[in-house]
Each structure stands twice: as structure tokens, then as C-alpha cells.
């Protein structure tokens, strides 16, 4: 997986798990929209990044018993690997200690509990790398300025 070099400004977009899941699952209602987005990111015509944590969420969704189509673990691992393996231009952001501190700051400030901590980790990785835009299906709007979060 390509390691991240901090990107200046909002021209690089953090891609959340739902975008990848929509692209990979033909039975997903987001498939038609997500497919060209992910392919553009893989080609490099859309500057995009993700995190290892987001990729683990994708693997989980692909192997879920109700996924359409459901992937066995080997298929899911290969599908996720191909999202970011060369020649893919998708960048995987590092998640070191600075990201951990920022995650805790965001979680405390926004009073996040339970599984919502993972969203704070993804946002922290993006912010530390200088990425302030996210493409997600988790929000009412697809692009959100995370630096004001």
C-alpha cells in the first residue's frame, strides 16, 4: 500500500468505507455512483486517500452474511488489497501517535462514544495529513469540512 505524504489543502479527499463498499457490492444501491468515483481515485484523476481502519471496515462489510454478493475472507482480502495496491493512486494515510492524540481530542470535544471513536480516528488521520474534505455516505452531505469539526 502506498504510504501517505501529507497533502496540502482540500484537493485530496478522504474516501470513507461506504464509498468502497458501494463500489465493490453490485447489489448495493450506491454502486452506480460509487463505481466511477473509486475508479477515478484509483486512476489518480480524483486525488483521494483512505486509512487502514477504513479498509478494515470494507473487509468487514464484504464478509458480512447479508452482503450482496457476500465475499469469503480470501475474496474480501483481495478486493480490499486491490483498492490500494499499485498501480492504484489511492493513498493510505499513516495513523501514528499524533493521529491518536488528535482522535482523542476530537472524541472528547464532540462527546463521541462507542463505535463512533472510529470516525474520530479517520478524521484525525485526515486532519493530521492536511486533508479537510471527506466523501462519505454517513452524512446528509457528501463533502464536509472536517477542519471545523
Image (cartoon, rainbow, N blue to C red):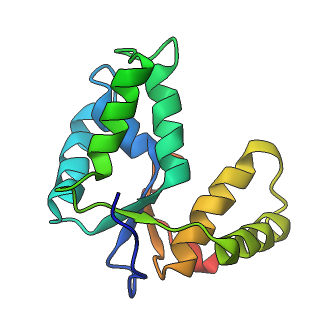
The answer to whether residue 21 is above or below residue 140 is above
Q: Nearer the viewer, residue 84 or 132?
A: 84
Could you tell me residue 123's position as x and y percent?
Answer: 59, 66
Question: Which residue, as the protein is rendered here, is positioned at the far top?
Answer: 65
Q: What residue sits 52% from the left and 71% below the top?
A: 126
Q: Is residue 6 left or right of residue 115?
A: left
The answer to whether residue 48 is above or below residue 54 is below
The answer to whether residue 119 is above or below residue 101 is above
Q: Is residue 1 left or right of residue 35?
A: right
Q: Is residue 3 left or right of residue 122?
A: left
Q: What residue sits 48% from the left and 82% below the top?
A: 130
Could you tell me residue 132's position as x and y percent?
Answer: 48, 76
Could you tell me residue 66's position as x and y percent?
Answer: 49, 12
Quadrant in which the C terminus appears:
bottom right
Q: What residue sits 44% from the left and 41% below the top?
A: 18
Residue 20 found in image quarter = top left
Quadrant in which the N terminus appears:
bottom left
Q: What residue sits 22% from the left and 35% below the top?
A: 32
Could you tell me residue 65's position as x and y percent?
Answer: 52, 11
State whether residue 139 appears in this view: no
Question: Which residue, as the protein is rendered here, is positioned at the far bottom?
Answer: 8
Q: Is residue 27 left or right of residue 16?
A: left
State whether residue 46 appears in this view: yes
Q: Nearer the viewer, residue 1 or 100?
A: 1
Amino acid at each position: 500500500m502506498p504510504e501517505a505524504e501529507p497533502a496540502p489543502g482540500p484537493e485530496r479527499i478522504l474516501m470513507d468505507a461506504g464509498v468502497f463498499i458501494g463500489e465493490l457490492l453490485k447489489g448495493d444501491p450506491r454502486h452506480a455512483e460509487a463505481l466511477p468515483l473509486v475508479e477515478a481515485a484509483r486512476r489518480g484523476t480524483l486525488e483521494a486517500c483512505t486509512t487502514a481502519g477504513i479498509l478494515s471496515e470494507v473487509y468487514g462489510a464484504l464478509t458480512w452474511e447479508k452482503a450482496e454478493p457476500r465475499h469469503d475472507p480470501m475474496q474480501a482480502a483481495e478486493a480490499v488489497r486491490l483498492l490500494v495496491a499499485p498501480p492504484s493512486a489511492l493513498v493510505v494515510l499513516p495513523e501514528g501517535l499524533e493521529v491518536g492524540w488528535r482522535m482523542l481530542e476530537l472524541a472528547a470535544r464532540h462527546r463521541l462514544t462507542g463505535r463512533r471513536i472510529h470516525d474520530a480516528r479517520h478524521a484525525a488521520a485526515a486532519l493530521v495529513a492536511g486533508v479537510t474534505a471527506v466523501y462519505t455516505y454517513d452524512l446528509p452531505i457528501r463533502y464536509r469540512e472536517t477542519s471545523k469539526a
